[in-house]
Amino acid sequence: MKIKIAKLISIVGHPLLTIPLYVALVMFAFTYIKKAAFNSFLIIGCIFIPLTLWLYLKSRNGSYTNFDVSDRKQRKSVFLFIIPILCVVTFIVYITGQSTNLCLSLLFALILISILQIVNLYVKSSLHVSFNIYLSFLIMSGNYGMGIMILLFTVPIAWSRIVLGRHTLKEVLFGGVIGFIVGLTMFVFMKN
């Protein structure tokens, strides 16, 4: 039963689900439809869909042992795949004059991924925990209470990653600290 609950929490808290869901909700709730569609296309269509397909194909053909890329050495290619895409999308968002907060959120996501890539040389930090803590600070910039709820939800996410054997306590803590520092720094720079 514990494993089933951990799997459910891990799926619900997967950054490939939580972040695109947040992006779509915020874009279409707070901006006009043409701008929301453009930004959603850039973020979801150009970052998350290609990344999800990449992970699916690599895990299916055996290059990755699983969809979460739990092997530290296999993660190198994930970072090499996503960082250039995120650089391009961040640049497009900036040159098309999108909101400062959107530009900052993408820039700090790029910083987060870059730090995680460097740390991955030594420790396989939990991306689930890191990105959900980062997301909580992103949400706090618009809705403080909801951001705190997401931040608290990272505790069961961390637990699930340990129970499923995808991470050790050390790896979860590293992911949490990195996500917290980058998220808090972004929050300070955001225009509330």
Image (tube, grey):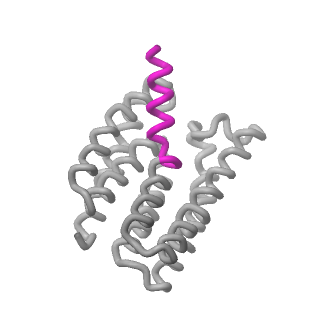
Residue 56 placed where, x, y %?
A: 69, 44
- Compared to 15, does 83 lie above or below? below
Look at 25% across and 57% down and name the residue there: 143
Does residue 184 appear left or right of residue 90 in this picture?
A: left
Type of secondary structure dominating the magenta stretch: helix
Look at 57% across and 57% down and name the residue there: 48
Residue 159 placed where, x, y %?
A: 38, 28
Say which quadrant the C terminus sits in.
bottom left
Which region is colored magenta? Answer: 1-17
Look at 70% across and 40% down and name the residue there: 59
Q: Is residue 166 magenta?
A: no
- Say how many tags the image has: 0
- Compared to 8, does 15 lie above or below? below
Q: Is residue 8 magenta?
A: yes
Q: Give whichever of 122, 164 is nearer the camera.
A: 164
- Compared to 161, does 130 lie above or below? below
Work out whether residue 108 can be spotted.
no
Q: Give whichever of 45, 35 is nearer the camera.
A: 35
Does residue 60 appear left or right of residue 55 in this picture?
A: right
Q: Give whichever of 69, 40 is nearer the camera.
A: 40
Work out whether residue 64 can be spotted.
yes
Residue 85 placed where, x, y %?
A: 59, 67
Q: Residue furthest top?
A: 1
Q: Residue furthest right?
A: 61
Look at 68% across and 51% down and name the residue there: 53
Q: Give whichever of 114, 153 is nearer the camera.
A: 153
